[in-house]
Amino acid sequence: MEKKAFRVFLDSNVIISGLFSDKGSPRIILDILCLTLPFLTGITGQYNIVEIERNLTKKMPEIFPIYREYFKKLNLEVIPLPSYETVKQFFGHTSEKDAPVLASAVTGNADFLVTGDKKDFSKAREISPFEILSPAEFLNTIVPEIIEFIKKPDAAD
């Protein structure tokens, strides 16, 4: 039986935290995505990338080249900016600034939305087709899957 493939949408704060800390759940998630496991696809939105790059340019411009180099290694699928019509469906379920994140995760067919700001998405749980998890909660979910994959004799193929 083929293992279910998981699509994990990373919010901007998870990517930024993971890039600038060599410890903690966000960094472990980024490191796992660099492994390009066949059952795990990392995704984020163009909206999130714009937010990340705006913050880096403003607060840490010297880090920008490092971000660009490391970001390539994540092999993230980038979901294009959702239309305003799509985004406005999520107004009232999260803040207006987070509605494009939610819309991108839905458009990207995410199984999980991983965010360091779960409280910002608390109302979205009612309508989202995916789980909204903190980085630590996501690791608790995915690590057993990784261990099972590693234990398989054909995992190296």
Image: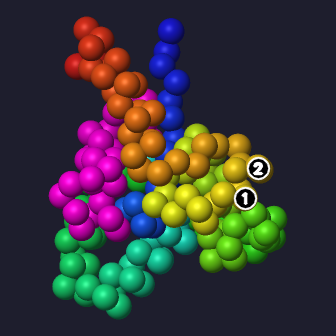
The residue that appears at 49% across and 15% down in the rendered structure is 2
Disc 2 to disc 1: CB gap under 8 Å: yes
**Is residue 47 a member of the stretch shown in magenta?**
no
Residue 126 is tagged as 2
Which color mode does the image show?
Answer: rainbow
User: In this picture, which residue range is highlighted in magenta?
Assistant: 16-41
Amino acid type indicated by mark 2: Glu
Q: CA distance from mark 2 to mark 1?
A: 6 Å
Residue 30 is tagged as none
Residue 87 appears left or right of 66: right
Answer whether residue 116 is visible to the viewer in this image. Answer: yes
Residue 147 appears left or right of 80: left
The residue that appears at 35% across and 91% down in the rendered structure is 58
For residue 40, which quarter of the picture? top left
Judge by depth and name the residue closer to the eye, 85 or 116: 116
- Is residue 5 depicted above or below 114 in this figure? above
Residue 48 horizontal/vertical position (percent)? 50, 69
**Is residue 28 a member of the stretch shown in magenta?**
yes
- What is the secondary structure assignment of the residue under circle 2? helix
Q: Residues within 10 Å of mark 2 (few under 14, many from 20)?
A: few
Residue 54 horizontal/vertical position (percent)? 42, 84
Answer whether residue 79 is visible to the viewer in this image. Answer: no
Residue 123 is tagged as 1
- Is residue 141 depicted above or below 16 in this figure? above
- What is the secondary structure assignment of the residue under circle 1? helix
Residue 101 appears left or right of 92: left
Q: Residues within 10 Å of mark 1 (few under 14, many from 20)?
A: some
Residue 157 horizontal/vertical position (percent)? 26, 18
The residue that appears at 52% across and 41% down in the rendered structure is 7
